[in-house]
Structure formats: structure tokens, C-alpha cells
Image (tube, rainbow, N blue to C red):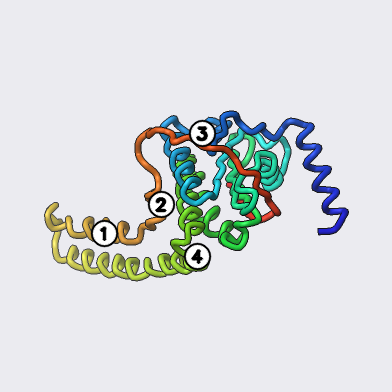
């Protein structure tokens, strides 16, 4: 990093600090900070409990921040400054991650950005974060105004990859294979349609009992092509009780991550 770039980062951090537009670190510290008010109490508790448990088990800290307005800042800059100002992640590992969400309104587009600390950049490459986590897991659910589902789906993948259950590349291969697996179901659907309508020509009507296999097959087809990553298996369904987040560790961020809008 050259001196001009370093000077720019220092000055930019100072300006943001003086402006006060980046929220102060909460006291007591929390991993979920819903300043935009898009989560219910149970949704908030589920996310907080799961992220606290994950931080205790792995030392990796995932911070979720929702804001009603970015105050004119680029989402990436806002997310990086949150991570730096709050010290997300461990100082000796730089294993923090910030998920910044600005909901869509009638006046502005929705924005999301996932910023990775230095220590997670190799584990979570920008391309995986962009295409597979943000575009595939989060934004489709955000477009339905289901912010909890989008956050939970993305966090599940992030947790699995950082825990080593599979690599980012293995996740991509699994995702692509899942899409290809849906092709036989489509072919089966059209074959079944031709078979049913072919039989219907020889009858004036079907009884409900005879038309039932079509709907059962249709349901099986749609169920078989459903992706399991949206099941939020890491999140409990109840409010639960907090184990108590011990605080941020002073991690650093170097510019890794990706985001999107809708």
C-alpha cells in the first residue's frame, strides 16, 4: 500500500469519525444491531443467540447492522468503517465480518454489503460472497421484504464455510449441481403433462381421484428442486436466552467483500 493510499484511508476514517454518521459501538456490545427496525423481537433474538454461539465456538465474529439511510456513503465504505471503528473480529486473527443492510424504500433502492476481515478474505473470496451469498441467498429474499430470511440464509452459508464444513469452491460446485439437477424434473413435468392431456382427450372429464396424481407429482417435483440452504438450520425458532456477547476483539479490514442492490 503506497503512502497516498494510506493517507487517504486515514483522512477518510477521520472524516467519518468527526461526522458521527457511522454509529457508535453499542454498550453493552451486540452482534445484531437493527437500527432500521426490520426484525421482530424473536428474529433479533434468534440471530443474536446464533451469532454469539458461533463467536464462542470459532472466535469468528459476524456483525449484522441494519440502517435506514447510508447518509450518502457508499455501502462498502460504510461497512468497512463499521468493522474498523467497532473492532470486529480478533486482533491476532482479523476474523471479523460485517453484514450491512439498508432496506428498500419508496425513495431508494435496498443495499447490502458483506465486508470480510483480513483473515477471512482467503476463506471467503469476493466472487463467492458476491454471486453465491449476496445474489443467490440474500437478495431474492430481500426482494420479498423477508429480511430475516435473507440474513439467515446468507449467514448459514458463511458459518458453514468458515467452520470448514465445505470450502467456498465446494459450495459453488454444490450450488451449480443443484441447478443442473432441476432439469430432469422439468422434463418429467412436461412428459407427465402430455400423458395426462393425452388421456383427457379420451374422457370428457376426470374425477378428482384421477386428477390427484398430477398434483402429487407436481408437489414432489417442486419439493425435490428446493435448495436446502434456505432452511436456516443454524437458527432456533424461539426467542431463547442470551449467553452474553463478550465484546469485539479489535480486528482489521483490508477491503475484501462484496454487495448488491435491489
> Which tag, 4 or 2, sits closer to the chain's start?
4
Q: CA distance from mark 4 to mark 3?
A: 31 Å
Q: Position of residue 92 (x, y in %)?
A: 64, 52
Q: CA distance from mark 1 to mark 2?
A: 18 Å
Q: Which residue is mark 3?
A: 38
Disc 3, SS = loop
Q: CA distance from mark 3 to mark 1?
A: 34 Å
Residue 2 visible somewhere in the drawing: yes
> Which tag, 3 or 1, sits closer to the chain's start?
3
Q: Are marks 4 and 3 in contact (CB under 8 Å)?
A: no
Q: Are marks 4 and 2 in contact (CB under 8 Å)?
A: no
Q: Which residue is mark 1?
A: 220
Compared across the picture, whether 166 is left or right of 88 comes to: left
> Which tag, 4 or 3, sits closer to the chain's start?
3
Q: CA distance from mark 4 to mark 2?
A: 18 Å
Residue 150 visible somewhere in the drawing: no
Q: Give 196 or 146, whichever is nearer the viewer.
A: 146
Amino acid at each position: 500500500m503506497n503512502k497516498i493510499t494510506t493517507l487517504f484511508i486515514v483522512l477518510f476514517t477521520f472524516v467519518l469519525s468527526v461526522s458521527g454518521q457511522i454509529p457508535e459501538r453499542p454498550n453493552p456490545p451486540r452482534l445484531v444491531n437493527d437500527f432500521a427496525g426490520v426484525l421482530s423481537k424473536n428474529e433479533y433474538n434468534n440471530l443474536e443467540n446464533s451469532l454469539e454461539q458461533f463467536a464462542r465456538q470459532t472466535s469468528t465474529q459476524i456483525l449484522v447492522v441494519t440502517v435506514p439511510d447510508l447518509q450518502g456513503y457508499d455501502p462498502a465504505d460504510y461497512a468497512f468503517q463499521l468493522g474498523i471503528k467497532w473492532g470486529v473480529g480478533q486482533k491476532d486473527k482479523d476474523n471479523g465480518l460485517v453484514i450491512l443492510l439498508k432496506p428498500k424504500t419508496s425513495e431508494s433502492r435496498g443495499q447490502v454489503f458483506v465486508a470480510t476481515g483480513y483473515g477471512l478474505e482467503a476463506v471467503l473470496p469476493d466472487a463467492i460472497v458476491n454471486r453465491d451469498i449476496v445474489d443467490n441467498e440474500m437478495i431474492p429474499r430481500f426482494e420479498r421484504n423477508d429480511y430475516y430470511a435473507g440474513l439467515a440464509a446468507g449467514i448459514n452459508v458463511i458459518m458453514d464455510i468458515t467452520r470448514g464444513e465445505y470450502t467456498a469452491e465446494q459450495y459453488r460446485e454444490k450450488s451449480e449441481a443443484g441447478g443442473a439437477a432441476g432439469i430432469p424434473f422439468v422434463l418429467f413435468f412436461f412428459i407427465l403433462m402430455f400423458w395426462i392431456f393425452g388421456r383427457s382427450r379420451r374422457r370428457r372429464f376426470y374425477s378428482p381421484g384421477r386428477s390427484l396424481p398430477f398434483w402429487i407429482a407436481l408437489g414432489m417435483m417442486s419439493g425435490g428442486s428446493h435448495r436446502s440452504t434456505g432452511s436456516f438450520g443454524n437458527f432456533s425458532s424461539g426467542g431463547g436466552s442470551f449467553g452474553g456477547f463478550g465484546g469485539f476483539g479489535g480486528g482489521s479490514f483490508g477491503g475484501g467483500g462484496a454487495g448488491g442492490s435491489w
